[in-house]
Image (cartoon, rainbow, N blue to C red):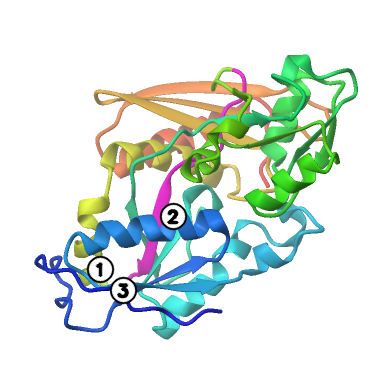
Amino acid sequence: MTTPTHPTSTTSSAAPGIAPHTQPPLVIATRESRLALWQAHHVQGLLEQQGLRVALLGMTTKGDQILDRTLSKVGGKGLFVKELEVALQEGRAHIAVHSLKDVPMELPEGFSLACVMPREDPCDAFVSPNYANLNALPQGAVVGTSSLRRQVLLQDLRPDLRIIPLRGNLDTRLGKLDAGQYDAIVLAAAGLKRLGMEERIRHIFTPEEMLPAAGQGALGIEIRSDRSDLQAALAPLVDMPTWLRVAAERAVSQGMGGSCSVPLAAYATLEGETLHLRAAWGDVENRHPLLRVERLARVTTLAEADALGLAAAADLQAAGARQA
């Protein structure tokens, strides 16, 4: 764990509800991977533009420490956020910045999602030193991924491939690929783009090829539920179209049990007030075919987005998908 640093104060007026920059800094709890720190620094910069003093509290989570087992076997996505929530509860930090796809569908009592920011590319990226795309891989090639969703979608596209688990932060995964342990790996395009590593991407899967994970590419900010002052300060960072989209996607996951042990994809697009939601469920053991559903609805509130996502989950279950 690192000690928060105090960045240089700015001179603009402070955000609503927060004391001016002469007061102690607002502290962001963040994981210490290169991508998580990029995300935290990004939020820090936006808040400093509002006249706030902002510092970072870097932390290592259990999800970062346990790399020899898949998340579905060791406790799920909450392993990436628990230590950050403890820091919020104890007052050592005030907000936590997360990749939204790592945030459990149900937050613990006393915590809330205060902000969803504009979304980066939500799609998956094919990364390989030798092959241009998935179709170029030879029969039986080894592909690495830590995601059950990606596993079932890859199996649907190329049943001959050997899908091998791949854990670790972005640099660790790329290092294992470069060491020859895999012919290719599949990563979130957003992380590679945010870190300026777009040249590693050989192909970006379209949603039609590989439906993204709920919330992929979006950043969420978590606070203690009793901090309405922070809610006001974070309001300028909110991107409501993104929030509506990811709320519907996350509701699909919630309706399916809210667990990363479910091989589930959910992706929404918004045109005007029409939300188009697509979801897919697969069976890792290949005992059932890949199931896909779609729903469209007029959506202007988070409650309406949630309802659409829960309806899509019900459609999947009616077609034979199993909950966690």
Q: Quadrant of residue 77?
A: bottom right
Instruction: Looking at the picture, tell me which residue is in the foreground, 223 or 10.
Output: 10
12 or 287, which lies in front?
Answer: 12
From the top left corner, tell me how far across and down residue 2 is, in percent: 52, 79
Is 250 positioned to the left or the right of 290 in the image?
A: left
- Give left or right: position of 301 versus 260: left
Q: Residue 40: give x, y in percent of width and height.
A: 42, 60
> Which residue range is magenta in the image?
209-226
- Can residue 33 be seen from the camera position used here? yes
Give the residue type at disc 1.
Leu
| Foreground label between 1 and 2 | 2
The secondary element bearing badge 1 is classed as: helix
Q: Amino acid at mark 2?
A: Gln
Binning the other alpha carbons within 10 Å of mark 2 as few (below 14), some (14 to 19) or many (20 upward) gives many
Q: Earlier in the sequence, mark 1 or mark 2?
A: 2
Q: Spot the residue most to the top.
A: 135
User: Which residue is the site of mark 2?
Assistant: 39
Q: Whole-Å distance between the Cαs marked 1 and 3?
A: 19 Å
| Cβ atoms under marks 1 and 2 closer than 8 Å | no
Residue, disc 1 = 230
Q: Are marks 3 and 2 in contact (CB under 8 Å)?
A: no
Q: Residue at x 74, y 34 (%)?
A: 151
Q: Which residue is mark 3?
A: 7
Disc 3 marks a residue whose amino acid type is Pro
Q: The N terminus appears in which quarter of the rendering?
A: bottom right
Residue in the picture at 76% in, 53% down: 70
Dot in front, 1 or 3: 3
How far across and down, in percent of the image, does residue 318 sit? 61, 28
Examine the structure image and report whether residue 150 is included in the region drawn in magenta.
Answer: no
Q: Is residue 78 above or below residue 56?
A: above
